[in-house]
Image (cartoon, rainbow, N blue to C red):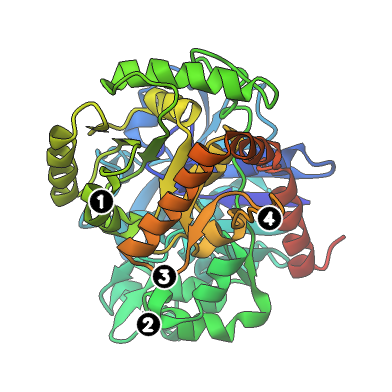
Amino acid sequence: MKIAMAASEAAPFIKTGGLGDVMQALPEALGLLEGNEVCLFLPYYGQIKRDKRWNCEFITSFAIQLAWRQCHVGLFRLQSDSLSYQVYFVDNEQYFDRNPIYGHLDDGERYAYFSKAVLACLNYLDFRPDVIQCNDWQTALIPVVLHGEFRGSFPATKTIFTIHNIEYQGWANSNFNYDVLGLPPSFNDSLRYGDATNFMKAAIVTADAVSTVSETYARELQYPYYSHGMSEVLIQRAGTFFGITNGIDTAVFDPSASPNIPFHYDVNSMAEQKAKNKVKLQEELGLAQDPNVPLYVIVSRLAGHKGIDLLCYICHSLMTRPVQLAIVGTGEAQYEQALSSLAWQYQGRMVVKLAFDPGLADRMYAGADAYLMPSRSEPCGLSQLIAMHYGTIPVVHATGGLQDTVLPYDPTTGEGRGFTFQSYNGEDFLYAIDRSMSLYYDDRAAWNRLAQNDMQLDVSWTIPAQSYMEMFKKVTGLS
Ligand code: GLC
């Protein structure tokens, strides 16, 4: 199958969140499947352009119209022998030489431009995909522009719109089509939401299929509590709305080989080696060095929706227990301050590093006993998958992808993956931590078996890539 993908970020080129990880691993997994031809389009941000690691070949340049604007499009191709897919970069310095990459007043115009340019580039390359897979609001206009301007060039191409984050939807004022997009007025209905323009809503009603990154989240999004105003339109797509749980790149996240981890391990050496990693980590973080105290960690953006509010609420109670707590991340000032002052109060037992540090994150996953993820809502979540792959037992709020991937531990059968709580409140969260702590102290053999079970779970992209192919086949009618 011929598959084109488009996104506003992808590791290792540029990444601000989980979307970047997915857009690294999913194209690779699809590209490895027999019979697939995959390409990925990204903006040629200044940060990528100036990065000496990437050698790019100039292919062509031309102009496209954005209503009354004539805009430059430069098309570059990554030179690489190691990827299973082609990477193309769309160059326009006026739009993409920005730091940070998001959060500018003209973001709507920038990504409307990108969406149009991707289709124009596919057309130039004479690559007629069977499907174009678009991700989040930044590429949400591709299905709309395909219908409005490029149908003649791509008569059989189907579009899939994948939701990773429903909170950012691409809002613009009501004359956006007239002023920027330049599609016929007959498209105003699809683009309009209330008295404004909403890119995501336009994709949901226009794409041939819609997907999100777990089955539970696909169900949750049909309720107003989770959907940020999109439940009505999503319910109308119910027959062609898919939930496919993400995987992780197990070549990148590998406790038996990662250069960041002092003592490598596999499922058999897990118990001894993790204990050594823990002591090293305790030393690095300034915690009391003790292999027999359970170390709970969090690697996260410090934001309310990640459940950091619950964590702050239970922290004093948690610190009355015989545990250690380490947190790494940056985020909202109120949480940075609250957690720092708590860590100061509980020195030696609790520590907070206000940093974005992938190396340290890797050592945290490797050295910790348990991983806390009390997110209020979570489309999929990748951290709990990494934790399980590292034999670090997750304690999570049973929502979205967390509910699908962390089945509750059953002490009588030994089945399950971790500890969960159902309602979003501090007492329930603390109770889940207490249950995990009891297992750690009362039955270390069972704890280790649970960690080993988690390590053996297949969290790679192999299974999800098959599910994406099933979805593509349903939508295209191809086999
Ligand atoms: C977003 C979601 C996260 C998901 C990721 C990749 O960051 O918040 O749950 O895992 O996208 O799909």
- Looking at the rendered structure, the secondary structure element under dot 3 is loop
Q: CA distance from mark 4 to mark 1?
A: 28 Å
Q: Amino acid at mark 1?
A: Ser
Q: Which sits earlier in the primary sequence, circle 4 or circle 1?
A: 1
Residue for badge 3: 423
The C terminus sits in image quarter? bottom right
- In the figure, 217 relative to 36: above or below? below
- Frontmost of labels 1 and 3 is 1
User: Which residue is at a point 53% across and 40% down the rendered structure image?
Assistant: 442
Q: Is mark 4 within 8 Å of ligand 1?
A: no
- Looking at the rendered structure, the secondary structure element under dot 2 is strand
Q: Amino acid at mark 4?
A: Thr
Residue for badge 4: 412
User: Which residue is at a point 21% across and 48% down the rendered structure image?
Assistant: 316
Q: Amino acid at mark 2?
A: Arg
Q: Residue 317 bears which disc, if any?
A: 1
User: Which residue is at a point 48% across and 52% down the rendered structure image?
Assistant: 435
Camera-side residue of 17 and 418 = 418
Q: Residue 192 bears which disc, if any?
A: 2
User: Which residue is at a point 61% across and 49% down the rendered structure image?
Assistant: 417
Q: Amino acid at mark 3?
A: Ser
Direction from residue 109 to residue 261 in the image, left or right: right
- Looking at the rendered structure, the secondary structure element under dot 4 is loop
